[in-house]
Image (spheres, coloured by chain):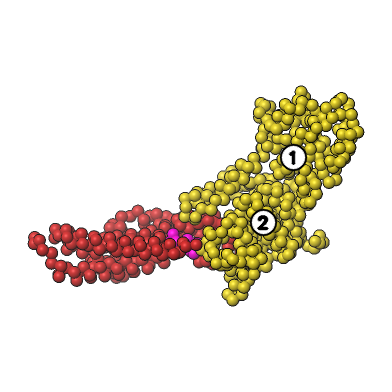
Chain colours: A red, B yellow
Amino acid sequence: MNNETDWDYLVPLLQKAFGETLWMVSISLLIAGVAGLALGLAVYVTRRGNFLENRTVFTVLNLLINTIRPIPFIIFVFAVGPLTMALVGRTIGMEAAIPPMAIMAAVAFARLVEQNLVALDPGVVEAARAMGASRWRIVWSVLIPEALGPLILAFTFLTIAVIDMSAVVGMIGAGGLGDFAIRHGYQRFNWEVVWATVLIIIVLVQVVQVLGNALARKALRR
Amino acid sequence: MSTTAPPMVSFRHAVKTFPAKSGEVRAVDDVTLDIRTGEIFGVIGYSGAGKSTLVRLINALEPATAGEVIVDGQDVTALPERELRRVRAGIGMIFQQFNLLSSRTVAGNVGYALAVAGWPREERKDRAAELLDFVGLSDKARQYPSQLSGGQKQRVGIARALATNPKILLADEATSALDPETTQDVLDLLRRVNSELGVTVVVITHEMDVVKYACDRVAVMEDGKVVEHGDVYSVFARPEHRATRRFVGTALRDRPSPAALERLRHRHPGRIVTVAVREDGASSTDLTRALREHPLDGTIIYGGIVEIAERPYGSLTLELTGEDAAIAGFITDLSRSTSVLDLGTAEHPLADPDAVGPRATTASSEADEGPSAPDPHQALGADRLGGVDHPFWSPFALLRRWRR
């Protein structure tokens, strides 16, 4: 093993891996953000005592979330293989990483959304109902704005979790920073490359967190 | 105000039940009641009496299980959700916890009610400014609710509730989270809403002082039933029901509690009587005359007289010393014009059946019948505890929701 790391060779690969991570994380977050918000709202409004109380819908959605969430992600990626095949037509590569990442992130976000809404003072919803607001209006003009700060923080948390997931999907040939660190670093006994990649991921996570905190603070400035 | 106008709200055998572990809870149990157009109507009761549920039948936030609730000529129990939204827009409501949208400014909160009611954007701003001027908060328009005091928040609540020119304003424990001085301000504002804007106001409270100060008529609720109702003075001056007597007692504190009575007997071993002072009964002048005309000595040892609905009301407790016959004559004489409660002597004590407050320390007082009235201070404390403004993400807010 040569002691000199060939950065001229590695940097373009690292850049490519970085781009792959960003792409996978962005697409997954986009889908998970919308789907998770909808799912979380659905669980909240059908919960007992809330304005679209529906035991059946609540139980089914709740069970769905509770079933998917505890599955270790590395196993989940393979377990949803048939679904991935049906959705994107292949089970390897970056596209194939999107369904498992988006699904896992959506159920995680749904739970986070629901928890933040449950913490909301139900009196505010009652006040809106007393004014004659429709249920749909209450969702977009009361629930979401009132919980916006915590929702932004939850999404920030989700983003970091999805970055974490993106490191695993190298297993199905989706590339990304995690894959780069393992193939060009760990498997070649080159710790320098591993640590460099880890540093990049740490910086990425920090940037996301600082951004999320700033946005949440802005939403909470009342 | 005219009493011939049709009532603004009519309950006809209204029932509301909630499913519970053991069968069901009848939160509102066969209530028949009229709230007149243009009056301030009070509903008083202890926690769990069903008063909050009763008021929610009016805007159908809680649909009635049975019976009719006629609001401004329309039976709201028969309306579908879409129609109800229109009815609700014509009924303002304010809350103990204010329930303002923390994500919107003061003006934004008032504007929100207008947006819900479908007002065009250009008109909302002017209307919001007009209302904030009415409640005296024009300078706070651009602030957020968290920057306001409790009294200011409730004023915003009132401005928001009045935004769409409702005919009815429902006030659900609207002053219970406020200190006495702020309570007075908010009640004054509600009186202005009633007199200047002609809005019928329904006030839900557990505080006798609120009813005494603001209401024209009152209904007393216990266990889901309206046990007594009528104009404030007659209900409280001649309380028929035990619950009503307890409210009067807690508010006035004109009659000694069992513990106080025991101390009084210690200092005043003679015959102790409590004489009611009312507009239509004996005034203190009658009392003075009776004391002069009968050969005995009377010492005032406890009591209080206040105004209810701008008329005198209360009682005085005296120690009488003299011949038994003279005392009997004095009691008979006064009993002709007012009610006299004989509490006996230290040697032969008689209990006050409607006593409120701390119990005597004697063993016999343990075997008291019925549930005791909650200590008003304690009740207030408990409400205040629930009333702290926790941010919605805090564990306390979560806990409060769970405890519901």
Q: Which residue is pictured at 65% across the width and 42% down the height?
A: B376
Quarter of the N terminus of chain B within the rendering: bottom right
State the residue position of label 2: B185
What span is in magenta? A144-151
Residue B229 point in image, percent of width and height: 76, 50
- Farthest right residue in view: B293
Residue B306 point in image, percent of width and height: 76, 45
Residue B274 appearing in the image: yes
Disc 2 and disc 1: Cα gap in Å? 26 Å
Local secondary structure at mark 1: loop
Local secondary structure at mark 2: helix
Residue A202 point in image, percent of width and height: 27, 60
State the residue position of label 1: B254
Magenta region includes residue A189: no
The amino acid on which the numbered mark 1 sits, given as a three-letter code, is Asp
Disc 2 crowd rating (10 Å Cα; few below 14, some 14-19, many 20+) is: some
Residue B216 point in image, percent of width and height: 76, 55
The amino acid on which the numbered mark 2 sits, given as a three-letter code, is Asp
Residue A83 left/right relative to B109: left
Residue B332, quarter of the rendered image: top right
Q: Chain of mark 1?
A: B
Above or below, A119 relative to B369: below
Q: What secondary structure prevails in the magenta region?
A: helix
Depth check: give the residue in front, B8 or B307.
B307
Q: Which residue is pictured at 89% across the width and 37% down the height?
A: B289
Depth check: give the residue in front, B148 or A137.
B148
Depth check: give the residue in front, B66 or B351.
B351
Q: Chain of mark 2?
A: B
Residue B73 appearing in the image: no
Residue B338, quarter of the rendered image: top right
Depth check: give the residue in front, A41 or B75.
A41
Disc 1 crowd rating (10 Å Cα; few below 14, some 14-19, many 20+) is: many
